[in-house]
Amino acid sequence: MVDLKALTASVGELDEEKVLEVLNGFVASNPSEEDAQKVVAACQSGMAIVGDLYEKGEYFVGDLIFAGELLTNAINTLKPVLGSGSTASAGSIVLGTVAGDLHDIGKNIFKSMCEAAGFTVYDLGIDQPASAFIDKIKEVKPKVVGMSGVLTLALEAMKDTVDAIKEAGLRDSVKIIIGGNPVTKEACAQIGADAFTTNAAEGVKICQGWVK
Amino acid sequence: MSDNTLMNERNQLFIDICNNKKPKRVPVTAGVTVEAAIEKMGYSLKRELYSPEKCFEAADEMAKLFDTDTLPTVPFTQAAVFRYIDQKFMQPGADGFFQHPNIAPLELDEYPEFNKDPFEFIVNKIQPRVFGILNEDPVLGHLKIKIARDVVASKFAGMAPKLVEKYQRATAITGCNLLWAPFDFIADYIRSFSTMIMDMKRKPQWVLDACEAVLQYEIEQIKNTPKRGTIPMISYPLHMPPFMRHSEVEKFWWPSFKKLMIATQEAGFIPSIFCEQNWDAHLDLLNDLPGTVIIGFETSNPKLVVEKVATRHIYQNFYPADILKHGTVEQCVEEAKRTIDTVAGAGNYIFSMSRGMIRGSDFKTENLQAVIECVKEYGKY
């Protein structure tokens, strides 16, 4: 079995080479699925360290992007020993960049950090109309809806989307978080979202608070 | 012959400030893009952005509304070219507004080939991947692109000088010449923002070599850049450092950029750099730049800038743009006074918003008008 604390620390330090070396050795040792789940949890704890360091100002957006990539590689490495029984999801999130906006870097950071925290994320992609959010909400019944945007006009699209969710009678079944460069407390109130953030790590904590 | 007294007075503000002399008052500029101007007119970007006449009409109206020292809106757009050549870097959203998607036309293992000769690689490999027209017709494609650019430029030719003359705006500085920091150029156009971050961690030497190769490519471009205005300028929007650790900025981003700044000054231009987002972690580096550089700040802490960045440089922007959309006239004016009090004391500040007004809904007309008038009065030295 691997040293889980050391693995968590390596993920937190974004030492990709070391993480993959440890994981490849672990997979080669023909481990049990239970042990594999412990290793996944250790990697997720490492991502939490990354989030904390970002909030403290020691890590930057680039580190978050790299952390997401590192975790994806780690999980892919572990896939052969994870088996079919997946870990219990912390909850589900429907996520997308709203209509008229083609930016997805922030959304993708939030997505990978949510997945690292155990959420199941349904990513709609960019430039998504309200109807795409509504169709997916009906289909997967998420606990959280996340809307992302960089352009100032995204705020109007977010409001249109929230209004459409209300009209469809789905507003009470979901918590809505908005994120991206232009979002503010005032915009959040006007849009009718439950929370806003410009910090992906903080956004994950908000979502975790909702699904407790 | 027209009386250009007002234009001359306005030019003098910029000439003084660029010669490290305190101008009569804080020069005031406002960047209202042609897209924002069109939307302010109630026009559609899907239609009128392709009409040089409507673009001119919108820019004329902005100049009428906003009495800034330079033209608030330059009547020019390459939207028609982007559409015609199917430019993957600039794609319109559902409402017709062009955006820059995060695409990476260079594969990781192609770095060594790119680094040998970026120009050759861009023309032969990158452009066919990002200009759709080259897929359809590779032989005539480049010619078609050149013709399209010339045709569009000819449609807008003379419009800006006409408005400058009519509204007596300064011509001493213009923001027409645009280049990129080498690292940013690669991140924006070659490897994308997010993959560049991976490359830096996984293939550091390739990234360093690419920055040096792009630096040489850009130095060649500087040689071909026309000198416009009394104070010839090249603008550099700076993207990546706010998203990187300081140690990474120092190692990967800064060295080639500093060399580029030196080359810009040696070629007879004053560099005008725009520190996008928050540069608080990297402000000390700016004193490492030789000579005078015009430095715009988006969301950096103004007090920290005054404390850390030498006054031989000229500060620009700072005024928090969002308040123009949400605030009252009184709040906007108070904020303008606060900005001047914080950053204009040494006489090295050009007033402008923290970012350009890119959509019609980004600002209320009366707010921007009040701020401009306030700066002209309150900003007297």
Image (cartoon, coloured by chain):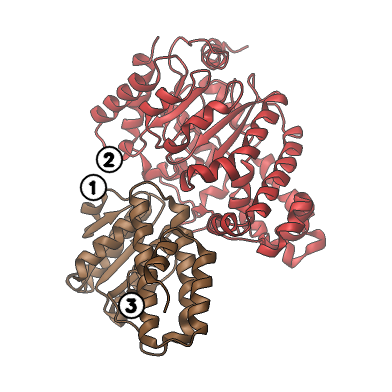
Chain colours: A brown, B red
Name the front one of labels 1 and 2.
Answer: 1
Q: Is residue B25 above or below residue B191?
A: above
Please give the name of the residue rendered at 60% of the width and 58% of the height, measured from the top-left corner. Answer: B199
Where in the figure is residue A57, as x and y percent of width and height?
A: 37, 46
**Which quadrant of the figure has residue A12?**
bottom left
Proximity of marks 2 and 3: CB atoms separated by less than 8 Å: no
Disc 3 target residue: A135
Q: Tag 1, which secondary structure?
A: helix
**Pointer 2 indicates a residue of which chain?**
B
Proximity of marks 1 and 2: CB atoms separated by less than 8 Å: yes
Q: Toward the viewer: B47 or B358?
A: B358
Please give the name of the residue rendered at 59% of the width and 46% of the height, measured from the top-left corner. Answer: B184
Disc 2 target residue: B326
Kind of residue at badge 3: Asp
Kind of residue at badge 2: His
**Which quadrant of the figure has residue A130?**
bottom left
**Pointer 1 indicates a residue of which chain?**
A
Name the front one of labels 3 and 1.
Answer: 1
Q: Tag 2, which secondary structure?
A: helix
Residue A186 disc label: 1
